Amino acid sequence: MVAETIMTVEVAEASAAGMKAIGAGLAVGLTGIATGIAEMAIGPAAVGATAENKDIFGLVLLLTVIPETIVIFGLVVALLMIF
Amino acid sequence: MLKAKTMSRLLIAASKDKLDLVVHELYRHNIFHIEDFVENEDEGYEGFKIGMPLSGASEISSDLIKIRSIGSTFGVSKDASEPDKKSSSVQIAQRIEHELPEIEKEVLELLGEKNAIAARVREYEQRLSEVSLFASLPGDLSLYRDYDQCTVFSGHIPADVDLPVPNEKVFSGTISGNLIVAVVAQENADEAERFLMDAGFQSVAVPREDGTAEERVNWYTQEITRLNSEMGQVDERINAQKEKHAAFLVACDELLTAEVEKAEAPLRFATTEETFVAEGWVPSDKMESLIADIRSATGGKVFVTEIEIDFEKDSVPVEYDNPDLLHPTELLLDVYSRPKYTEIDPTLFMSILFPIFFGLILGDVGYGIILLAMSFGLRKFLTGDAGGQLLNTLRNASISSIIFGLLYSEFLGFALPWDPLLFSRHLNIGGHAGGHGPAVVELMVLSAWIGIFHITLGRILGIINHSRQDHGAHRQKAILGNLGWLLTMWGILVIIWSMAAIPLMPDFSGMAPVLAGLNMAGIVGGVIVLAGIVGIGQENALELLEIPTIVSHVLSYARILAVGLSSVAIAMVINYISIGLFIEPAMENLDIVSIIIIIFGIVVFILGHLFNTALGLLGGGLHSIRLHYVEFFTKFYRGGGKKYNPFGMKRKFTED
């Protein structure tokens, strides 16, 4: 007996849904890494600057979250893919 | 609202013998922001020198230092204490004269006693650690020293050894590093020492004590206990003194701080041999009463006048002019930068929009209630103006969160018993939620609309700011530039609408194509964009590079949906794990194991939601602030205004 892979409509649909989910996961995951890399440099500088001058805490907190836009775009893309 | 408090620039000049009267009056009013005089031969100020402190300044300063040092001994601080009642400053001044030396003497005595005891405790602890090393040594410690014919070796050694010379030796392996004490004849001392050194011997002298080591250990231990209890008594006496004098000390501190500030005020004035000139800022509505009071205090022998403000040169101090309701949001503005005097104060917009953004992101009744409780519960710990402002902001935000939670029909990730009145954010996690799933597209479009209107508002405010602050050709260019940005954004929108049908947005895609695939609306949009680009370019051609930020800034508002939805997802996952995976299956047949599993599930539920509350506070708060700071403020706000800091003090503990 030779087992043949048969591509039924159901399998194709399930596979497409799976690919979508993987794509969405990649969109969030990769942008998350990118945000992490970007914040990696800002974070220490922000902490250092705050140690020198406490008054700028608000400002550096803001600077630190600026790269979060990247992951937010990733999340938006992922949501649009899934829904 | 929308504008800083109107300020007037005052100039006060009088002869020096009126100096203290004027300073006293200014300090009492607590509204005069002194413009510090700098000796750089400004026009009209040639020959003026910085003034000298009032007489008595150094005595007051030294009294203040005494009081602060007593205060720090007692651990009394002005900021931490709340006044029961205000004391009269005359009374306090008398008490400073009569009682302060007495109190200082008492405190010094107590401190001396405490330090002496502490020093003795330290010394005894040191001795104790030395003696306890030799605790296993037999006989009196005095027997181990002062021999003419013998040498005593004592110290640590890695392992017991047999000396190659005649000796008496004690070895103990029970203490760390081992102990060896060996007595050898004088003539063999060198050889024994060499041998010991080779064996890794480290010399520790036998303490010069009398009695056996064990006796000494007991004695020192007892003494340390006794001294510590003595120390406790001294601490109690210090505490008693603190109770007795705390109110007096904080009142003194306040009174003397005020005196010192008054005495040093002339250092900020311009003076000549016989006269002085003080310049500063006063809120315009209070100017008349201040002038009248200065005149009456000095018997009219003073020259006070309002001088015209030169907006090019003067930096006018900025005091917010908002109703109490908007007061908390001023903190968020100060964190960024205080508005300039001539600029629009955006507190009003921010205090309306910040809670709305926060609610849109963290719209959950449960989390809202937790945060609301927090904003009241933390009031004990976060005192002071800024703390209060922060908690009030949190209170407003959490109320908005509860309202949006009702609209979204969410309670800790569960659905409330009605369908979402606004768009649904219920995800299908663990098969709990039914319905249509989240209305992601609609929420996204809503976020984009919020962004579009927020940015449009920002640009309009920018136009108003430029028309107020700038002059001539620059003014016109800046206004047209801002208009250009607005047109470009809306033009791009019209083009998008002409191409695709988007829910909740106008749809022009049904029109027939006219030119190059664009329909009429698309062409109109294109023309608007072109006009906008010309507007931007005529202000500064380099800014054309920034045009893509129009899209990225509007899309940035998608975080309202994204952060909110991720918070809902985390909440639902927590519910699914704790209830769906632990509690529900365990409820089916109850035994010891399943009860443990249920407890574990409850712990997961509580910890998970605490974690998500913190995340929601951080996410909702930071992202809402960020949308204001980055997307909104960059359109119109410059900031950098000088804080209005009047000369004087809000008195907490004393009164005249």
Image (cartoon, rainbow, N blue to C red):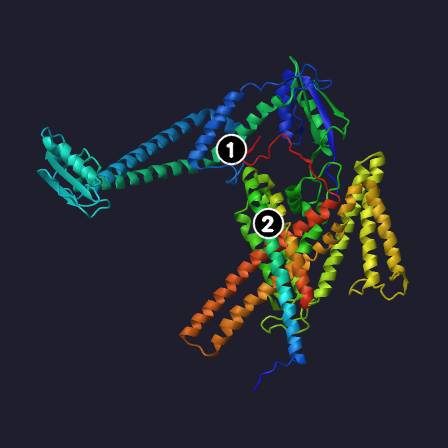
Dot 1, how many residues are within 10 Å of its Cα: few (below 14), some (14-19), or many (20+)?
Answer: many
User: What label sits on residue B251 in the rendered view?
Assistant: 1
Mark 1 or mark 2, whichever is nearer to me: 2
Residue at the image point whose x is 44% and y is 37% from the top: B75
x and y percentages locating residue B116 in the rendered image = 31, 32
Residue at the image point whose x is 31% and y is 33% from the top: B119
Q: In 3D space, how far apart are the residues under numbered discs 1 and 2 (Cα atoms)?
A: 48 Å
Residue at the image point whose x is 18% and y is 33% from the top: B208
Q: Amino acid at mark 2?
A: Glu
Q: Nearer the viewer, residue B570 or B80?
A: B570
Q: Is residue B363 visible?
A: no
Q: Is residue B601 left or right of residue B39?
A: left
x and y percentages locating residue B167 in the rendered image = 9, 38
Tell me the SS state at disc 1. helix
Would you name the residue on which mark 2 appears?
A: A39
Q: Amino acid at mark 1?
A: Ala
Q: Is residue B12 left or right of residue B148?
A: right
Q: Is residue B416 left or right of residue B187?
A: right
- Is residue B406 shown above or below B471? below
Quadrant assignment, res B220: top left
- Is residue B414 shown above or below B368? below
Tell me the SS state at disc 2. helix
Which residue in the rendered view is the most extreme toward the bottom?
Answer: A1
x and y percentages locating residue B373 in the rendered image = 57, 56
Locate the N terminus of chain B and report the quarter of the image it occupies. Answer: top right
Mark 1, chain letter? B
Locate the C terminus of chain B and report the quarter of the image it occupies. Answer: top right
- Is residue B546 shown above or below B272? below
x and y percentages locating residue B158 in the rendered image = 22, 44
- Is residue B42 shown above or below B219? above
Total count of labels: 2
Q: Is residue B176 visible?
A: yes
